[in-house]
Amino acid sequence: MNERWAINVDVEGFSAHYESGEDGKTRAILALGELMHAVFSIGTRVFPGTHENNFSERLFAHKYGDGFLLCSNFPESDPSRAIAIAAAIMRHMTMSGFATKAAISSGDMSDIKGCYPKPLRDATDERVDMGWGLMTIISVMGTALTKAHRLASNSHGAVLVVDRGLLGDSSPTHCIDWVSSDLPLAHDIANQSGLRVGSPAELHERLRAYCSRSPEPPAKWVAATFAHLKEPLS
């Protein structure tokens, strides 16, 4: 990998829940808050960056809509850390009663605020007044965002999909069995950050419970979710 890896992770079914009534709206907001908690906990407790490693392990997280883009500080030799972080987040969210999708790609990210009009360049806290109204701005952009977001948009279900370019493969994408795969680093990340883990059997049970809860996800979504997951041993 000669570019920074990027994880696009978002709450599945956010719009359907948000538009299904007050209870659904509350659930959607709680899911987003739980995702925010998971990302923040990993960034502050596991990979905060230190003087000893020249901050090379630190993460950057940017909120977009109902999800986040997580980026590495520098290019890394392989996507194993990104996969472990994504799996830890997805397992925690599933054990908390929510569903997520994660897509991993690579690219560049840069601060583009200098290209904005002067009133926005001078904004503090990424906010600028519009009379009595308000505009909020995001000052970063790059192919890390566009490629990871496109990969996520082309995938269905609660899946963890990786750009095969990161794996040295000629095929477009690769789906990871994030429920049953033996990922020691994902366990370490979860334990250090205080996230929930769950056994493969527990994760399957929580996914099935999610699929039967109103508003029920489409059959195509359910099929895609379980297509790449190994059935746990009874």
Image (cartoon, rainbow, N blue to C red):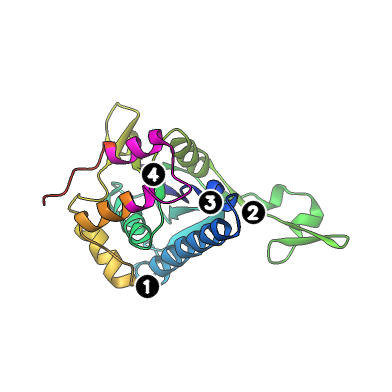
Q: Residues within 10 Å of mark 3 (few under 14, many from 20)?
A: many
Quadrant of the rendered structure where residue 121 is? Answer: bottom right
Disc on res. 138: 2
* Front-most of residues 27 and 193: 27
Examine the rendered structure and indicate whether residue 193 appears above or below residue 90: below
Disc 3 to disc 2: CB gap under 8 Å: no
Residue bounds of the magenta highlight: 209-226
Q: Earlier in the sequence, mark 3 or mark 1?
A: 3
Disc on res. 17: 3
Residue 155 image position (x, y, % from top left): 41, 35
The amino acid marked with disc number 2 is Ile
* Front-most of residues 72 and 151: 151
Estimate the spatial distance between the alpha carbons at disc 4 and disc 2, rounded to whole Å. Answer: 21 Å
Dot 2: what SS? loop
Dot 3: what SS? helix
The amino acid marked with disc number 1 is Arg
Disc on res. 45: 1
Estimate the spatial distance between the alpha carbons at disc 3 and disc 2, rounded to whole Å. Answer: 26 Å
Dot 4: what SS? strand
Q: Earlier in the sequence, mark 4 or mark 3?
A: 3
Estimate the spatial distance between the alpha carbons at disc 4 and disc 3, rounded to whole Å. Answer: 25 Å
Regarding residue 196, the answer to whether it shows in the image is yes
Examine the rendered structure and indicate whether residue 106 appears above or below residue 205: above
Q: Earlier in the sequence, mark 3 or mark 2?
A: 3
Nearer to us of marks 3 and 2 is 3
Estimate the spatial distance between the alpha carbons at disc 3 and disc 1, rounded to whole Å. Answer: 31 Å
Q: Is residue 231 magenta?
A: no
Disc on res. 104: 4
Dot 1: what SS? helix
Disc on res. 205: none
